[in-house]
Image (tube, rainbow, N blue to C red):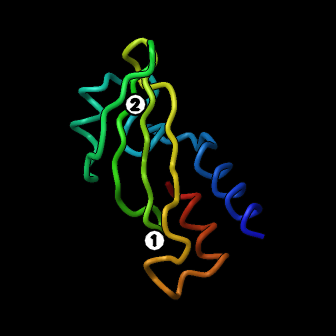
Amino acid sequence: MKKLFLSLLTVLLTTNTGFSQDFRNSSWGDSMEKVKTLEKATSVSKEEHGLEYALAYTGWVVGFKAVTVYAFVDSKLARGIYRILKQKPQDPSLTKGSFTTKMRKI
């Protein structure tokens, strides 16, 4: 059940919803500097992996403690990843249905 939940979370977080932002407040192809100005969460690291760079932030995603990672290729935003850190939501009234509804909004 936990794997199903995390799989659903991954699909919902990576689906293009047609909004002007592709990942959080950023768009694919944004520069690292632009992402830094748009992201309001707490910065935790900047890493270099060959030609790729990553920025990581901690915060809350639909009620769950999470790390948000922005991955850059050729200095442009190419991927966004959420890693849920806390299994229980911040809001104990969060149900499976309300979680799905909130995930569709981000």
Task: Give the image quarter of residue 54.
Answer: top left
Task: Give the image quarter of residue 27.
Answer: top left
Secondary element at tag 1: loop
Please state if 26 lies on the left or on the right of 101 as rendered: left
What residue appears at the point 46 percent right and 27 percent down from the top-left corner?
Answer: 28
Residue 99, relative to residue 33: is it above or below? below
- The x, y position of residue 101, in whole percent, is 60, 67
Please state if 32 lies on the left or on the right of 50 as rendered: left
Dot 1 crowding, Cα within 10 Å, few <14, some 14–19, many 20+: some
**Residue type for callout 2:** Ala
**Residue type for callout 1:** Gly
- Quick one: label 1 or label 2, which is nearer the N terminus? 2
Residue carrying label 1: 63
Q: Nearer the viewer, mark 1 or mark 2?
A: 2
Residue carrying label 2: 54
What residue appears at the point 55 percent right and 81 percent down from the top-left corner?
Answer: 94
Query: Of residues 20 and 94, which is closer to you in this image?
Result: 94
